[in-house]
Amino acid sequence: MPFPLIKLVYLFVKQVSKPLATRVTGYMKEKPFIRSYIMIPLAQAYHRSEANLKLMLLYNQKGHKVKVNPLSEEAAVNLASDMMNDIFIFSIAFVVLYQEYVRSAKSSAAEKLQRENEILSINNQLDDLVLITERHDAQLREADRERHHLLTLVSDLQTWSSSCTKLISEKQESHLREVFRRIKNLQAIQLTVHSKNSKVDHINIAMDRKDKSN
């Protein structure tokens, strides 16, 4: 809790508890036992200690004690009443501030626990994301290997297709050459046959002429 807020709380508690403290000290004044054996001795002791401390600070005489005149009974009772009022108010303020401190500590502990849980949840989510990323990377590597394998197969198929096409072209070319060769042979045979027929025709004509002349 910030200091101005603490001061404000103390002033509030002081104003609220002052009537109660006055009533308690008034009740204690009316009790002879408390008045004679608690309030007056407490006030006289405080008066002597305060007087000795003032003299020590004033004359700088440490450990030097002087005789202090005691307070009258009424003055001692009034001083004790003021002291008890202050003690009572400080006690209530201390209890209130302590309760506020405990509540703030619990709230801080709860917030800290919540932050730790949030951080743990974020770390778990990051671990899950890392696992998912690694799984995706493995799938991508596997897909890349498959793609490389398919590209290799396609390349092999293209090479085989080119080889087959070349082989077929060579066979077709060889077949065409053979056909052309046979056609040329047939043409040569036809020419030979035609020449022989021409010669036979000439011989037949000559023989016919000879027969006619005879």
Image: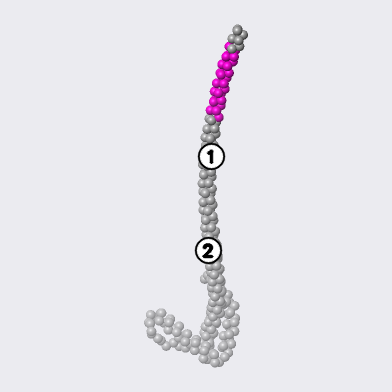
In this rendering, the answer to whether 90 lies above or below 180 is: below
Q: For the residue marked with disc 2, what is the amino acid?
A: Asn
| Visible residue check, residue 134 | yes
Which residue corresponds to mark 1?
A: 164
In what element is the residue under mark 1?
helix
x, y (%) of residue 157? 53, 43
Q: Name the residue at 52% across, 71% down.
A: 3
| Visible residue check, residue 104 | no
Q: Which of 34 and 134 is in front in this view?
A: 134
x, y (%) of residue 202? 58, 14
Magenta stretch, residue numbers: 179-206
Query: Residue 179: which numbered mark, if any?
Result: none
x, y (%) of residue 112? 53, 69
Q: Quadrant of residue 113?
A: bottom right
Q: Name the residue at 59% across, 87% down.
A: 27
> In the current view of this chain or complex, which residue is farthest to the front?
214
In what element is the residue under mark 2?
helix
**Is 141 colored magenta in this rendering?**
no
Q: Nearer the viewer, residue 1 or 63?
A: 1
The numbered mark, 2 or 1, whose residue comes first in the sequence reads: 2
Which residue corresponds to mark 2?
A: 123
> In the current view of this chain or complex, which residue is farthest to the right?
212
